[in-house]
Image (spheres, rainbow, N blue to C red):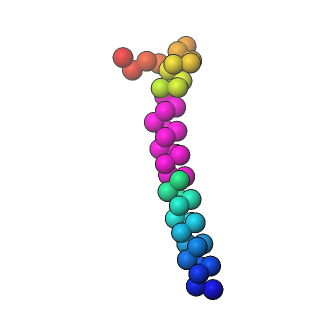
Amino acid sequence: MGKQSTAKTIFLLISMVGWLLIGATLMYLTPAFLDQFLPAIAPTSG
């Protein structure tokens, strides 16, 4: 029981960190991606 519970906790922690990293990466890269491929839609900050 304890071993299974520990594995589940570790899996949840890793998945949470993974989603946080994915979300941060998307928020960081989306403006640059839009600016590069859709210059008519995304206004340039420069």
- Seen at 59% across and 81% down, the residue is 3
Counting from the top left corner in percent of width and height, residue 43 is at 47, 18
Does the magenta run of residues contain 30? yes
- Seen at 49% across and 40% down, the residue is 25
- Seen at 49% across and 28% down, the residue is 31
Q: Quadrant of the N terminus?
A: bottom right
- Determine whether 32 is above or below 15 in the image: above
- Determine whether 8 is above or below 35 in the image: below
Q: Quadrant of residue 15?
A: bottom right
- The foreground one among 12 and 27 is 12
Q: Is residue 4 left or right of residue 13?
A: right
Q: Quadrant of residue 9?
A: bottom right
Counting from the top left corner in percent of width and height, residue 36 is at 51, 19
Residue 18 in view (yes/no): yes
Magenta part of the protein: which range?
Answer: 19-31
- Seen at 55% across and 13% down, the residue is 40
- Determine whether 23 is above or below 46 in the image: below
Q: Quadrant of the C terminus?
A: top left
